[in-house]
């Protein structure tokens, strides 16, 4: 790993202070930021970092089972990618952790490459998740700026109907439809009809029951 | 009767004849001499001579004979005279003879009783089932006045403690064929360093005015084998400058041998049980070692990465190396703890601090306790800091009791699991109490200590029985009961650790 790698933050929950700081040193040497927590409560209190991050979680924690905590995060909608580690993991444990969405499951003692690769993958996953979430939010803002009429036009246009078919369905003139359509493209910052279609898919506003040739 | 007579006759003749001759001589003196004294009083001598036979009949006969002769003498010399001073003298003589006879007879009774007492003592001495001998230590007693170096004195004493008499059991003890082999001699050939030490102690004791001394020691018998004995040396009131010292010995060789074997068996059993305990903790122990090893590996990798960066982080590398050192030590400490527990060693009774032992034990059990969500509360009185005993065995007891508490609480419903460990000072003892908040003991708590009693599926049922044996070897007792507020309490006492650090 070199410093050109996109930075990220690794949160570590391990009740063993030495192992915690050892992991901290390893990640810092790879240019990652670290946040160390002795227990789950301390982590929850601090909150998930705002940058791309992941959680390295020990399964055997003093007061709590790491797997239980992982499931709790999922149920609370805290979508931080998790790398699990344990002193003596067995297959049922591994299965349970992976089902709950763990990126990797590492037995102690682990190799540095292994751990860094797992953490990099986890951070990458978080970055993708974050980008997707961010994109959807932006799109939703644009969609909010449309008038009800414009939304109606957009819903029909993205099904592949021609302007006059849209005009016919809405009882408007083709000119009016063209104006609405132009507004939609501008407000949604769509470069092409195909772009608009993808946005509609993402927003879930495409009416799948309408087809161009089934009128 | 004939036999009796035959036996007695020579004695009678021996004492009777001189008495008779003496009586006749006195008669002659009385009758023939012109002396006007109370010659008849001399008949008392006849009675005394006869009484030397210790024969009642002969003494009485002598008295009567003497009296008869006295009367005869009076008749011969003074019959025709009116009653006066001669008659008075006769009366006095007769009274003297009677008194002498009476005193002699009474003396017989005393002598007889003395003889019977001696006989009884003799019988006791001979037939006592244990070795006993009477010694003459008068030479030692004399030497005491001039010799002050204890070493020299003991050497002298062992050569000059003459055996006056000994019984058959004592001859057996020393392995000699007959009592005569030792009578008049000493037991110098049977000495051992221990017996020399003991002799020194005994002499010191007697010198300080003690009259009964008990000492455990060792002799070497004629065959060369060592015999362990408990000696009881008694100085009778009439010892007359240590001329008579009575020594009784109890042969405890077999008992000591059995005790040694028992101790060995117990130590081995304790060791097996310890190893078994460690087996139960293997997951925890593996974790305890794996944890620092993981840290070491991670720090080593991390250090390498810091070095290979464009701007090597020297401070970070130093930090990594520091941590590698501390974690290495941490792993080594865990191993040292286990090594002590698994080592098969003779028990060593010494003074040690209780708190570090409790901490170490808790550290070995920490994972198990944590995973069962058991909280630990440790309290110790200031006076209960040091105890006397074998550290490893006491740790075994603590670990066994704590593990039992942990397992019983884990088996019960969750919530409020707590293990309380307290040590308090009660006089010469430190009492250690281990209390849990589990379901308590069902049935008689004493049953827990029976061998092969277990409530666990894979338990051997030896743990508590061994724990109790260990505590008993330390002079204490391990007990169990239910606490009024629920849960079980195990309690045991150990001697307070004194500065001498000697055996219990």
Image (cartoon, coloured by chain):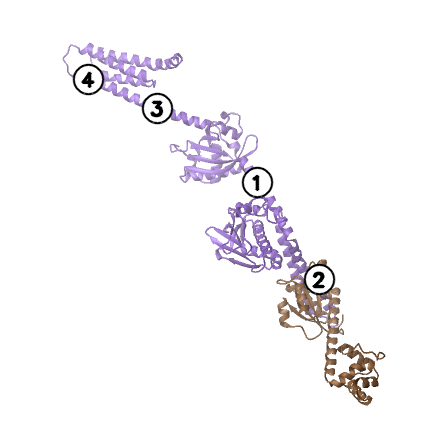
Chain colours: A brown, B purple
Q: Which residue is mark 2?
A: A96
Q: Nearer the viewer, mark 2 or mark 4?
A: 2
Q: Is residue B49 left or right of residue B226?
A: left
Give the mark, 1 or 4, whose residue is nearer the N terminus.
4
Where residue B238 sits, quadrant-wise, is top left
Screen quadrant of the N terminus of chain A: bottom right
Which label's residue is closer to the chain start, 3 or 4? 4
Look at the image and tell me whether residue A189 can be seen: no
Q: Which residue is mark 3?
A: B111
| Residue nearest the observer in this picture, B445 or A107 | B445
Q: Position of residue A41 (x, y in %)?
A: 62, 68
Q: Position of residue A185 (x, y in %)?
A: 79, 85
User: What is the x, y in percent for residue B263?
Assistant: 57, 42
Q: Chain of mark 2?
A: A
Cβ atoms under marks 3 and 4 closer than 8 Å:
no
Depth-wise, is mark 2 or mark 3 nearer the camera?
Answer: 2
- Relative height, residue B311 to residue B58 (above, below): below
Query: Marks 2/4: CA distance?
Result: 135 Å
The reply, left or right, for residue B319 in relation to residue A121 is: left
Residue receiving disc 4: B89
Front position among marks 1 and 4 = 1
- Identify the chain of the residue marked 3, using the numbered disc in the image: B
Instruction: Compare residues B234 and B24 and report the one nearer the observer.
Output: B234
Q: Nearer the viewer, residue B172 or A128?
A: A128
Q: CA distance from mark 3 to mark 4?
A: 32 Å
CB contact under 8 Å: marks 1 and 2: no
Q: Nearer the viewer, mark 3 or mark 4?
A: 3
Label drawn at residue B262: 1
């Amino acid at each position: 790993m070199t410093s050109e790698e996109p930075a990220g933050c690794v949160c570590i929950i391990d009740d063993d202070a030495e192992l915690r700081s050892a992991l901290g040193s390893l990640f810092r040497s790879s240019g990652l930021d670290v946040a160390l927590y002795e227990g789950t409560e301390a982590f929850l209190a601090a909150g998930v970092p705002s940058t791309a991050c992941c959680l390295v979680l020990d399964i055997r924690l003093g007061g709590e089972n790491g797997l239980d905590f992982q499931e709790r995060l999922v149920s609370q909608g805290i979508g931080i990618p998790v790398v699990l580690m344990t002193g003596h993991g067995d297959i049922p444990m591994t299965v349970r952790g992976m089902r709950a969405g763990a990126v990797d499951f590492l037995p102690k003692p682990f190799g540095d490459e292994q751990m860094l690769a797992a953490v990099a993958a986890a951070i990458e996953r978080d970055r993708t998740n974050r980008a997707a979430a961010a994109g959807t939010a932006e799109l939703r803002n644009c969609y909010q700026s449309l008038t009800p009429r414009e939304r109606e036009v957009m819903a029909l246009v993205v099904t592949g109907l021609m302007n006059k078919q849209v005009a016919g369905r809405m009882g408007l003139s083709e000119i009016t439809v063209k104006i609405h359509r132009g507004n939609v493209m501008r407000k949604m910052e769509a470069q092409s009809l195909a772009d608009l279609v993808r946005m509609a898919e993402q927003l879930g506003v495409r009416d799948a029951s309408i087809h161009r040739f089934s009128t | 009767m004939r036999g009796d007579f035959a036996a007695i006759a020579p004695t009678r003749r021996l004492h009777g004849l001189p008495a008779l001759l003496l009586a006749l001589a006195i008669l002659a003196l009385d009758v023939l001499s012109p002396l006007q004294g109370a010659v008849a009083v001399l008949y008392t001598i006849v009675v005394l001579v006869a009484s030397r036979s210790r024969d009642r009949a002969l003494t009485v006969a002598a008295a009567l004979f003497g009296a008869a002769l006295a009367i005869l003498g009076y008749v011969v010399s003074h019959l025709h005279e009116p009653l006066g001073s001669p008659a008075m003298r006769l009366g006095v003589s007769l009274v003297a003879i009677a008194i002498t006879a009476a005193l002699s007879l009474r003396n017989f009774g005393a002598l007889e009783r003395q003889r019977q007492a001696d006989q009884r003592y003799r019988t006791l001495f001979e037939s006592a089932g244990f070795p006993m001998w009477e010694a003459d230590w008068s030479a030692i007693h004399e030497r005491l006045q001039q010799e002050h170096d204890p070493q020299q004195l003991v050497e002298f004493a062992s050569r000059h403690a003459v055996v006056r008499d000994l019984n058959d059991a004592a001859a057996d003890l020393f392995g000699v064929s007959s009592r005569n082999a030792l009578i008049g001699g000493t037991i110098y050939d049977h000495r051992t360093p221990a017996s020399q030490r003991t002799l020194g102690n005994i002499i010191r004791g007697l010198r300080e005015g003690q009259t009964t001394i008990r000492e455990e020691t060792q002799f070497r018998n004629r065959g060369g084998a060592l015999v362990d004995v408990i000696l009881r040396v008694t100085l009778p009131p009439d010892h007359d400058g240590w001329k008579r010292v009575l020594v009784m010995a109890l042969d405890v060789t077999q008992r000591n041998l059995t005790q040694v074997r028992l101790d060995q068996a117990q130590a081995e059993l304790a060791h097996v049980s310890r190893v078994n305990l460690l087996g139960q903790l293997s997951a925890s122990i593996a974790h305890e070692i794996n944890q620092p090893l993981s840290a070491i590996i991670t720090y080593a990798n991390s250090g390498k990465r810091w070095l290979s960066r464009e701007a090597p982080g020297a401070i970070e590398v130093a930090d990594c190396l520091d941590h590698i050192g501390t974690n290495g030590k941490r792993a080594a400490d865990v191993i040292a703890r286990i090594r002590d527990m698994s080592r098969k060693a003779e028990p060593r009774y010494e003074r040690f601090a209780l708190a570090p032992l409790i901490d170490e034990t808790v550290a070995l059990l920490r994972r198990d306790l944590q995973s069962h969500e058991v909280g630990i509360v440790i309290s110790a009185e200031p006076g209960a800091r040091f105890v006397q005993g074998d550290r490893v065995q006491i740790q075994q007891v603590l670990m066994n009791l704590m593990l039992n508490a942990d397992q019983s609480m884990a088996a019960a419903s969750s919530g409020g699991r707590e293990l309380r460990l307290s040590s308090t000072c009660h006089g010469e003892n430190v009492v250690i109490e281990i209390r849990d908040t589990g379901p308590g003991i069902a049935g008689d708590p004493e049953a827990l200590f029976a061998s092969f009693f277990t409530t666990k599926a894979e338990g051997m049922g030896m743990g508590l029985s061994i724990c109790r044996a260990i505590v008993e070897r330390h002079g204490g007792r391990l007990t169990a009961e239910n606490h009024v507020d629920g849960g079980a309490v195990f309690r045991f006492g150990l001697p307070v650790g004194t500065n001498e650090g000697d055996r219990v």
